[in-house]
Every structure is written in structure tokens, then in C-alpha cells.
Image (spheres, rainbow, N blue to C red):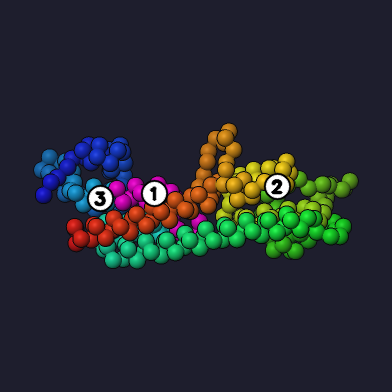
Amino acid sequence: MKTYKTAEVASIIGIHPNTVRLYEELHLIPRPKRQPNGYRIFTDFHIEQLRLARIAFQIEVLQNGLRRKIIQMIKVSADRDFDTALALSHEYILQVRQERANAEEAIEIVKRLLSGGNEAGSRCLKRKEVSEYLHVSMDTLRNWEMNGLLTVKRRQNGYRVYTDQDISRLKIIRSLRCANYSLEAIRNMLQQVCANPDIDIKEALDTPKEDADIITVCDKLITSLAAAEENACQIVGMLHDMKDRFS
């Protein structure tokens, strides 16, 4: 059986030796045996397990327990419980597909809301009334305003007044947030809609600004979910191979 030192493993995978040790501490790979001098002894199984983990973490989707599920899959694979790892991978794929369907559905809701124009009437609601009407907490409404998703007018006494146009915009924000779109992606899309009502909503939501300092998974949600599903399907194939080789 071929064995490897920590530096050799790191070179093969393309990571820092400290990352190898970190994966060991987190139980993402089996604890390696040690030589009398204390040096770790890694095997081909460690190599494949590290490759599996790297692919799993390439696209980290955080919402609704998906990250916990993929971490659990890696850990049971490290214990050579490949059947459980495969079952978790299939569950992960199904959930990612559902998240993607939710994201697509939210886009259709936004399209309908935008095509319908502003709601009829001339309501002027206070924040508490809007919170109860939309079933959204007042803290959430404050957060959306603080992050620039909408600007609410104030009366002379300083109280915010939400109009029908504001409520339509809030329904759009609520639908997209429920589907786990980031605040940055929503703000970017709303700004583009104001400039051009005929934009492709899906593309606008999935295209971060070029000057963004940090681009998260939720800033490219549909693309990220598609990539996560593709990686998970690759993981299933790897697990079958590992089961054949290392069981």
C-alpha cells in the first residue's frame, strides 16, 4: 500500500499542509497513523477523501441545512460508511433542486408583480400595519430599508408612510428573500428595473456588479445551485468508486 507524507498530500491536492491538518481536526478525513517519529502516514483513501471534500466545499450553499448535510456526508464517508454517504448525497441533490425551483418560482412572482403595475388605491400605512399586512417583522422592514432596498417617505411628524408602490416593492423583496436571494442581488435587480423595466429579471438577479468587493453564493443563486447540483452528482460517482476500492 502506497503511503504519503503531509507535504506530499498537500502537493497532490493543491492545498497548504495546514489545510490537511485542519481537515483531520474537523474529522473530514480519517485520523492517519503515525510513524515512531510522529510524522503522519496518509493513504490513497485519504487522497480520495480530500478530493471529495474539496469538491463538496467548492460551492457552499448555506440555506436550509444544506451545508450541514454536505458536511455530514463527508464525515460519514471518512468513516467508510459509503451507503449512508450516498443516501445523504441524493438527499442533498433533491434539496438543491427544490431550492432552485423556489428561486425560479420567485422570479415568476416578481415578473407578475412588475407586469401588474402598482397596486390600485392610495393606501398610506404605518410600518406596524405593513408588518402585519405582509407578515414580515418590523425589524426585517428596517433592515431592508437600511440596506437600500427601498426608501420610505416620512410625514411631517417623522413617521414613515408606506404607499401602494412601496407595498408592491416589498412583496417583490419578500418573495426573493424567501427564496434566499441576497440583499445585494435584490438591490442590484431593483436598480436595473428602475433604469430599464424590460430587463431580464433572472439575469439581473444572477449577475453581481463588477465592482462588488465580495460575491457570495446567494449573489449568483441559480448559477450556484446549478453548480452545487453538478458537483453533488460528481460526488455520487466518486463515492461509488471509493466504495468499490476501499470498503
Residue drawn at x 87%, y 57% as measured from the top left: 122
Residue drawn at x 60%, y 61% as measured from the top left: 105
Residue drawn at x 85%, y 56% as measured from the top left: 124
Q: Nearer the viewer, residue 152 or 176?
A: 176
Disc 1 to disc 3, C-alpha distance: 14 Å
User: Residue 64 colored magenta?
Assistant: yes
Q: Residues within 10 Å of mark 3 (few under 14, many from 20)?
A: some
Asked if 98 appears above or below 21 in the picture, the reply is: below
Q: What residue span does the magenta drawing correspond to?
A: 51-67
Q: Nearer the viewer, residue 109 or 211?
A: 109
Give the residue at mark 2: 198
Predominant secondary structure, magenta span: helix
Q: How many marks?
A: 3
Give the residue at mark 1: 57
The x and y percentages for residue 4 are: 17, 42
Is label 3 in a helix, a strand or a loop? Answer: helix
**Residue flagged by tag 3: what amino acid is it?**
Glu
The x and y percentages for residue 25 are: 30, 48
Q: Nearer the viewer, residue 12 or 124?
A: 12
**Residue flagged by tag 1: what amino acid is it?**
Phe
Q: Which image quadrant is residue 238 in?
A: bottom left
Q: Quadrant of the C terminus?
A: bottom left
Asked if labels 3 and 1 touch by Cβ distance under 8 angstroms, the answer is no
Is label 2 in a helix, a strand or a loop? Answer: loop
Residue drawn at x 70%, y 47% as measured from the top left: 198
The x and y percentages for residue 7 are: 22, 37
Disc 2 to disc 1, C-alpha distance: 36 Å
- Discs 3/2, front: 2
Extreme residue in the right direction: 156
Give the residue at mark 3: 48
Q: Residues within 10 Å of mark 1 (few under 14, many from 20)?
A: some
